Protein backbone atom coordinates (compact mmCIF):
# COMPACT_ATOMS: atom_id res chain seq x y z
CA UNK A 1 0.00 0.00 0.00
CA UNK A 2 1.69 3.22 -1.09
CA UNK A 3 1.39 6.80 -0.02
CA UNK A 4 -1.84 8.11 -1.49
CA UNK A 5 -1.39 11.82 -0.77
CA UNK A 6 0.09 12.43 -4.22
CA UNK A 7 -3.20 11.25 -5.80
CA UNK A 8 -5.53 12.65 -3.14
CA UNK A 9 -8.16 14.70 -4.94
CA UNK A 10 -9.09 16.73 -1.87
CA UNK A 11 -5.53 18.07 -1.58
CA UNK A 12 -5.87 19.57 -5.07
CA UNK A 13 -8.75 21.78 -3.97
CA UNK A 14 -8.32 25.43 -3.03
CA UNK A 15 -6.41 26.03 0.25
CA UNK A 16 -9.47 27.77 1.68
CA UNK A 17 -11.47 24.56 1.26
CA UNK A 18 -8.77 22.47 2.92
CA UNK A 19 -8.29 24.90 5.81
CA UNK A 20 -12.01 25.35 6.50
CA UNK A 21 -12.52 21.60 6.56
CA UNK A 22 -9.69 20.90 8.99
CA UNK A 23 -10.59 23.89 11.16
CA UNK A 24 -14.14 22.58 11.59
CA UNK A 25 -13.26 18.93 12.20
CA UNK A 26 -10.50 19.82 14.66
CA UNK A 27 -12.65 22.26 16.61
CA UNK A 28 -15.63 19.91 16.71
CA UNK A 29 -13.40 16.97 17.66
CA UNK A 30 -12.14 18.92 20.68
CA UNK A 31 -15.50 20.43 21.70
CA UNK A 32 -18.07 17.70 21.07
CA UNK A 33 -17.80 15.09 23.82
CA UNK A 34 -20.91 13.13 22.88
CA UNK A 35 -19.95 9.44 22.57
CA UNK A 36 -21.44 9.20 19.08
CA UNK A 37 -19.46 12.26 17.91
CA UNK A 38 -16.25 10.89 19.41
CA UNK A 39 -16.68 7.56 17.64
CA UNK A 40 -17.48 9.28 14.34
CA UNK A 41 -14.43 11.52 14.63
CA UNK A 42 -12.03 8.71 15.54
CA UNK A 43 -13.20 6.26 12.85
CA UNK A 44 -13.22 8.84 10.05
CA UNK A 45 -9.83 10.24 11.11
CA UNK A 46 -8.36 6.74 11.09
CA UNK A 47 -9.89 5.99 7.69
CA UNK A 48 -8.68 9.20 6.05
CA UNK A 49 -5.17 8.94 7.50
CA UNK A 50 -4.88 5.38 6.17
CA UNK A 51 -6.12 6.56 2.77
CA UNK A 52 -3.47 9.29 2.74
CA UNK A 53 -0.45 7.48 4.15
CA UNK A 54 -1.16 3.78 3.74
CA UNK A 55 0.93 1.35 5.81
CA UNK A 56 2.66 4.17 7.63
CA UNK A 57 -0.69 5.37 9.02
CA UNK A 58 -1.77 1.82 9.90
CA UNK A 59 1.37 1.34 12.01
CA UNK A 60 1.03 4.73 13.68
CA UNK A 61 -2.69 4.37 14.40
CA UNK A 62 -2.62 0.85 15.78
CA UNK A 63 0.78 0.80 17.46
CA UNK A 64 0.95 4.38 18.79
CA UNK A 65 -2.50 5.98 18.97
CA UNK A 66 -4.45 2.96 20.23
CA UNK A 67 -1.96 2.18 23.05
CA UNK A 68 -2.00 5.88 23.94
CA UNK A 69 -5.80 5.74 24.03
CA UNK A 70 -5.75 2.75 26.38
CA UNK A 71 -3.13 4.26 28.71
CA UNK A 72 -4.99 7.59 28.90
CA UNK A 73 -8.27 5.83 29.62
CA UNK A 74 -6.65 3.88 32.45
CA UNK A 75 -4.86 6.87 34.00
CA UNK A 76 -7.94 9.08 34.39
CA UNK A 77 -9.92 6.94 36.90
CA UNK A 78 -6.74 6.45 38.93
CA UNK A 79 -6.55 10.19 39.65
CA UNK A 80 -10.10 11.38 39.03
CA UNK A 81 -12.68 10.09 41.49
CA UNK A 82 -15.72 12.19 40.59
CA UNK A 83 -19.04 10.55 39.86
CA UNK A 84 -21.82 9.00 41.89
CA UNK A 85 -21.74 5.43 40.56
CA UNK A 86 -19.11 3.80 42.78
CA UNK A 87 -17.93 0.43 41.46
CA UNK A 88 -15.29 -0.36 44.07
CA UNK A 89 -12.58 1.24 46.18
CA UNK A 90 -8.91 1.45 45.27
CA UNK A 91 -6.19 0.25 47.70
CA UNK A 92 -5.58 3.87 48.77
CA UNK A 93 -9.25 4.23 49.77
CA UNK A 94 -10.37 6.40 46.84
CA UNK A 95 -13.52 5.33 44.99
CA UNK A 96 -13.46 3.98 41.45
CA UNK A 97 -16.50 5.40 39.67
CA UNK A 98 -18.16 4.47 36.42
CA UNK A 99 -18.26 8.11 35.36
CA UNK A 100 -14.50 8.57 35.73
CA UNK A 101 -13.84 5.45 33.66
CA UNK A 102 -16.14 6.50 30.83
CA UNK A 103 -14.83 10.07 30.89
CA UNK A 104 -11.28 8.70 30.63
CA UNK A 105 -12.31 6.66 27.60
CA UNK A 106 -14.01 9.72 26.06
CA UNK A 107 -11.01 12.00 26.70
CA UNK A 108 -8.61 9.40 25.29
CA UNK A 109 -10.78 8.98 22.19
CA UNK A 110 -10.87 12.74 21.69
CA UNK A 111 -7.08 12.99 22.05
CA UNK A 112 -6.43 10.16 19.59
CA UNK A 113 -8.86 11.64 17.05
CA UNK A 114 -7.29 15.11 17.27
CA UNK A 115 -3.76 13.72 16.85
CA UNK A 116 -4.92 11.69 13.85
CA UNK A 117 -6.65 14.71 12.29
CA UNK A 118 -3.49 16.78 12.75
CA UNK A 119 -1.48 14.11 10.94
CA UNK A 120 -3.92 14.41 8.02
CA UNK A 121 -3.69 18.22 8.22
CA UNK A 122 0.10 18.07 7.86
CA UNK A 123 -0.25 15.98 4.71
CA UNK A 124 -2.79 18.27 3.03
CA UNK A 125 -2.04 21.81 4.27
CA UNK A 126 1.44 22.43 2.90
CA UNK A 127 3.48 25.52 3.77
CA UNK A 128 2.70 27.24 0.46
CA UNK A 129 -1.05 26.86 1.11
CA UNK A 130 -0.69 28.32 4.60
CA UNK A 131 1.36 31.27 3.34
CA UNK A 132 -1.19 31.86 0.56
CA UNK A 133 -4.05 32.09 3.06
CA UNK A 134 -2.36 34.14 5.78
CA UNK A 135 0.61 35.76 4.03
CA UNK A 136 -1.09 39.14 3.72
CA UNK A 137 -2.93 39.02 7.05
CA UNK A 138 -0.06 37.90 9.28
CA UNK A 139 2.97 37.80 6.96
CA UNK A 140 5.69 37.37 9.58
CA UNK A 141 3.85 34.73 11.62
CA UNK A 142 2.71 32.78 8.55
CA UNK A 143 6.27 32.74 7.22
CA UNK A 144 7.66 31.50 10.54
CA UNK A 145 5.02 28.78 10.88
CA UNK A 146 5.49 27.59 7.31
CA UNK A 147 9.27 27.46 7.76
CA UNK A 148 8.86 25.50 11.01
CA UNK A 149 6.50 22.99 9.42
CA UNK A 150 8.93 22.62 6.51
CA UNK A 151 11.98 22.41 8.74
CA UNK A 152 10.82 19.51 10.92
CA UNK A 153 10.65 16.84 8.15
CA UNK A 154 13.88 18.17 6.60
CA UNK A 155 15.59 17.94 10.01
CA UNK A 156 14.44 14.32 10.40
CA UNK A 157 15.68 13.39 6.92
CA UNK A 158 19.03 15.12 7.42
CA UNK A 159 19.69 13.45 10.75
CA UNK A 160 19.11 10.08 9.08
CA UNK A 161 21.66 10.98 6.39
CA UNK A 162 24.28 12.04 8.96
CA UNK A 163 23.56 9.01 11.16
CA UNK A 164 23.97 6.62 8.22
CA UNK A 165 27.22 8.32 7.22
CA UNK A 166 28.55 7.98 10.78
CA UNK A 167 27.48 4.35 10.87
CA UNK A 168 29.62 3.60 7.81
CA UNK A 169 32.76 4.68 9.71
CA UNK A 170 31.70 2.99 12.95
CA UNK A 171 30.77 6.17 14.83
CA UNK A 172 27.04 5.77 15.17
CA UNK A 173 25.08 5.82 18.46
CA UNK A 174 24.85 2.02 18.21
CA UNK A 175 28.64 1.50 18.20
CA UNK A 176 31.02 1.25 21.15
CA UNK A 177 30.57 1.67 24.87
CA UNK A 178 27.97 3.88 26.51
CA UNK A 179 30.45 6.76 26.76
CA UNK A 180 31.49 6.33 23.13
CA UNK A 181 27.84 6.21 22.03
CA UNK A 182 27.20 9.47 23.89
CA UNK A 183 30.17 11.07 22.14
CA UNK A 184 28.95 9.83 18.75
CA UNK A 185 25.49 11.21 19.49
CA UNK A 186 26.98 14.60 20.41
CA UNK A 187 28.96 14.57 17.16
CA UNK A 188 25.79 13.90 15.14
CA UNK A 189 23.94 16.63 17.05
CA UNK A 190 26.80 19.08 16.44
CA UNK A 191 26.67 18.32 12.71
CA UNK A 192 22.91 18.89 12.71
CA UNK A 193 23.25 22.26 14.44
CA UNK A 194 25.89 23.32 11.91
CA UNK A 195 23.67 22.20 9.05
CA UNK A 196 20.69 24.08 10.53
CA UNK A 197 22.66 27.32 10.84
CA UNK A 198 24.01 27.05 7.31
CA UNK A 199 20.54 26.30 5.98
CA UNK A 200 19.12 29.34 7.81
CA UNK A 201 21.82 31.59 6.30
CA UNK A 202 21.19 30.22 2.81
CA UNK A 203 17.43 30.76 3.20
CA UNK A 204 17.96 34.34 4.38
CA UNK A 205 20.29 35.11 1.46
CA UNK A 206 17.84 33.56 -0.99
CA UNK A 207 14.93 35.59 0.41
CA UNK A 208 16.95 38.80 0.34
CA UNK A 209 18.03 38.21 -3.27
CA UNK A 210 14.40 37.69 -4.27
CA UNK A 211 13.31 40.96 -2.71
CA UNK A 212 11.48 39.68 0.35
CA UNK A 213 10.11 42.52 2.45
CA UNK A 214 10.46 45.19 -0.23
CA UNK A 215 7.44 47.49 -0.66
CA UNK A 216 5.28 46.78 -3.68
CA UNK A 217 6.58 43.26 -4.12
CA UNK A 218 3.95 40.90 -5.52
CA UNK A 219 3.61 37.17 -4.93
CA UNK A 220 2.93 34.45 -7.46
CA UNK A 221 0.10 32.05 -6.74
CA UNK A 222 -1.18 29.00 -8.58
CA UNK A 223 -4.43 28.79 -6.60
CA UNK A 224 -7.74 29.83 -8.18
CA UNK A 225 -11.17 29.49 -6.62
CA UNK A 226 -12.97 27.31 -9.16
CA UNK A 227 -16.58 26.16 -9.37
CA UNK A 228 -15.82 22.84 -7.67
CA UNK A 229 -14.15 24.73 -4.81
CA UNK A 230 -17.24 26.86 -4.32
CA UNK A 231 -19.42 23.75 -4.24
CA UNK A 232 -17.13 22.16 -1.67
CA UNK A 233 -17.09 25.34 0.43
CA UNK A 234 -20.88 25.47 0.37
CA UNK A 235 -21.21 21.81 1.38
CA UNK A 236 -18.67 22.10 4.20
CA UNK A 237 -20.25 25.33 5.42
CA UNK A 238 -23.79 23.91 5.43
CA UNK A 239 -22.72 20.72 7.22
CA UNK A 240 -20.70 22.68 9.75
CA UNK A 241 -23.66 24.97 10.41
CA UNK A 242 -25.97 21.98 10.96
CA UNK A 243 -23.54 20.62 13.54
CA UNK A 244 -23.36 24.03 15.20
CA UNK A 245 -27.16 24.16 15.42
CA UNK A 246 -27.18 20.71 16.99
CA UNK A 247 -24.76 21.91 19.64
CA UNK A 248 -26.71 25.14 20.18
CA UNK A 249 -30.00 23.31 20.77
CA UNK A 250 -28.34 20.78 23.05
CA UNK A 251 -28.77 17.72 20.82
CA UNK A 252 -25.03 17.05 20.87
CA UNK A 253 -24.72 17.87 24.57
CA UNK A 254 -23.38 15.19 26.87
CA UNK A 255 -21.97 15.38 30.40
CA UNK A 256 -20.09 12.81 32.46
CA UNK A 257 -20.10 14.35 35.96
CA UNK A 258 -21.63 13.98 38.44
CA UNK A 259 -23.88 11.66 36.47
CA UNK A 260 -23.87 10.87 32.78
CA UNK A 261 -26.59 12.72 30.96
CA UNK A 262 -27.28 13.65 27.38
CA UNK A 263 -30.09 15.12 25.35
CA UNK A 264 -33.34 13.20 25.60
CA UNK A 265 -33.76 10.88 22.62
CA UNK A 266 -36.08 12.33 20.07
CA UNK A 267 -38.03 10.96 17.18
CA UNK A 268 -37.57 12.09 13.62
CA UNK A 269 -34.87 13.29 11.31
CA UNK A 270 -34.31 16.57 13.20
CA UNK A 271 -32.81 14.74 16.17
CA UNK A 272 -30.43 12.64 14.07
CA UNK A 273 -29.62 15.40 11.57
CA UNK A 274 -26.67 16.88 13.56
CA UNK A 275 -25.07 13.44 13.91
CA UNK A 276 -25.56 12.70 10.21
CA UNK A 277 -24.22 16.15 9.31
CA UNK A 278 -21.14 15.60 11.48
CA UNK A 279 -20.47 12.20 9.91
CA UNK A 280 -20.92 13.66 6.43
CA UNK A 281 -18.59 16.56 7.29
CA UNK A 282 -15.85 14.20 8.45
CA UNK A 283 -16.00 12.05 5.32
CA UNK A 284 -16.07 14.95 2.83
CA UNK A 285 -12.51 14.21 1.58
CA UNK A 286 -13.27 10.52 1.15
CA UNK A 287 -16.46 11.33 -0.80
CA UNK A 288 -14.53 13.73 -3.04
CA UNK A 289 -11.80 11.16 -3.64
CA UNK A 290 -14.29 8.44 -4.50
CA UNK A 291 -16.12 10.74 -6.92
CA UNK A 292 -12.85 11.67 -8.62
CA UNK A 293 -11.88 8.00 -8.92
CA UNK A 294 -15.27 7.18 -10.40
CA UNK A 295 -15.00 9.99 -12.95
CA UNK A 296 -11.46 8.93 -13.84
CA UNK A 297 -12.53 5.32 -14.42
CA UNK A 298 -15.46 6.54 -16.54
CA UNK A 299 -13.15 8.63 -18.75
CA UNK A 300 -10.80 5.67 -19.16
CA UNK A 301 -13.66 3.43 -20.24
CA UNK A 302 -14.97 6.03 -22.72
CA UNK A 303 -11.53 6.52 -24.23
Image (cartoon, rainbow, N blue to C red):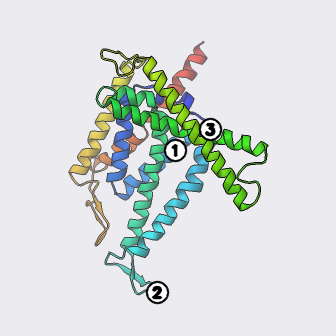
- The residue to which callout 3 is attached is 158
Pick out the residue farthest to the left: 249
- The residue to which callout 2 is attached is 91
Q: Nearer the viewer, mark 1 or mark 3?
A: 3
Q: Nearer the viewer, residue 185 or 43?
A: 185
Q: CA distance from mark 2 to mark 1?
A: 41 Å
Quarter residue 267 falls in:
bottom left
For label 3, the crowd category at 10 Å Cα-Cα, with few meaning under 14, some 14 to 19 and many 20 or more, is some
Q: Quadrant of the N terminus?
A: top right
Residue at the (37%, 25%) spot, across then down: 132
User: In this rendering, is residue 293 above or below 69?
Assistant: above
Name the spot of residue 204 as percent of width and height, x first: 46, 27
- The residue to which callout 1 is attached is 47
For label 1, the crowd category at 10 Å Cα-Cα, with few meaning under 14, some 14 to 19 and many 20 or more, is some
Name the spot of residue 250 as percent of width and height, x first: 23, 55
Q: Nearer the viewer, residue 194 or 43?
A: 194
Amino acid sequence: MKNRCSVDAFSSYHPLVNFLYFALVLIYSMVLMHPACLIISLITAFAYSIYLKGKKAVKFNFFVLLPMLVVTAIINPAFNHEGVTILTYLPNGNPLTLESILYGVAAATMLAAVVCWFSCYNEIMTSDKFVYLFGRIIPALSLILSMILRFVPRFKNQIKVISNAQKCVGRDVSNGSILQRARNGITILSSMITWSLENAIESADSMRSRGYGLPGRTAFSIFNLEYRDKKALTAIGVLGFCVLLGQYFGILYFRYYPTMKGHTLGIGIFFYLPFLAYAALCIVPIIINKQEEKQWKATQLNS
